[in-house]
Image: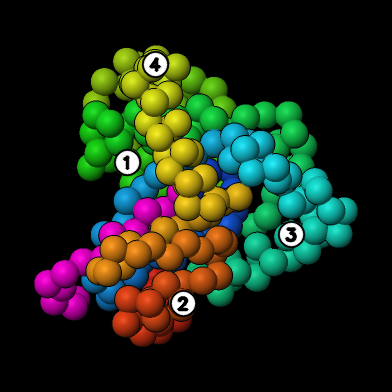
Amino acid sequence: VVAMSKKFAIDLYFDVISPYSFILFESLLAYRTQWPMEVNLKPVGLAHIFKAAGNQAPAIAVPGKGPYMHKDVNRLARYYNIPLKFREDFLTVITTKSSLNANRLIAAVKLEQPEKAEAVARALFRRFWIDRSDIFDTKDFVEVLTACGVRDVTRLVSSLSSDAVKEVMKQNTDAALETGCFGAPWTVLHLSNGKRESFFGSDRLHIIGHMMGQKFDGPLPAKL
């Protein structure tokens, strides 16, 4: 573990429905043992980001992107040793269901039990992308929170439509858009000179490290 006198702040904007968000979530967090950084998890609703930025889900907007994304996600997952495989039903899921409440769940936990937020985010990613289970209903959320040892499960799940949780999601979305965000994952690195550098996608880890004066040594073991 490196001695870290000054840590860089990194904001990671993500949606658990995004496979690239899952890949960056694991690969970036694994580097906390090597790089002087604190990663601030900021769940967002990708549908809101797309709408505000005038964007569309890549797999929907351009016919050729769906098959490419399928191969690309599987390649990246193998490289980073994350046992996810692209879901055959992904297009159906993103056009018929919403991940907003799953992302709100992370925001709600972060508000009240911040030390559990990372575990809950990982459990949601894992449930959807590795276990092939749903992350859309109260039953799903209760199972995730219980498995993560979160307190006050029933109350937390019932707080997803509360003003406080909606406000956190709005703040996250507005902050992401203000830095030019148009999709997820979106990473904002705060430099010591007060400037910010923004990165789209899961494949800029080496550049993020470089901008902190750090070396990228390839994939580190994920916490899965």
Q: Which residue is mark 3?
A: 70
In percent of width and height, residue 129 lies at 58, 48
Q: Which residue is mark 2?
A: 207
User: From the image, which quarter does the N terminus lie in?
Assistant: bottom left
Q: Which residues are magenta?
A: 1-13
The amino acid sitting under disc 4 is: Ser
Q: Which residue is mark 4?
A: 162
Q: Residues within 10 Å of mark 3 (few under 14, many from 20)?
A: some
Q: What's the residue at 46%, 77% (across, down)?
A: 207
The amino acid sitting under disc 1 is: Ala
In percent of width and height, residue 20 lies at 58, 57
CB contact under 8 Å: marks 4 and 2 = no
Q: Is residue 36 left or right of residue 92?
A: left
Q: Residues within 10 Å of mark 1 (few under 14, many from 20)?
A: many
Q: Residue furthest right?
A: 63
Q: Is residue 37 visible?
A: no
Q: Which residue is mark 1?
A: 117
How far apart in space, not on screen, are marks 3 and 2 (Cα)? 24 Å
Q: Quadrant of residue 210?
A: bottom left
Sooner in the amino-acid sequence: mark 1 or mark 3: 3
In percent of width and height, residue 162 lies at 39, 16
User: From the image, which quarter does the C terminus lie in?
Assistant: bottom left
Q: Residues within 10 Å of mark 4 (few under 14, many from 20)?
A: few
Q: Is residue 90 magenta?
A: no
Q: Nearer the viewer, mark 4 or mark 1?
A: 4
Q: Is residue 59 left or right of residue 182?
A: right
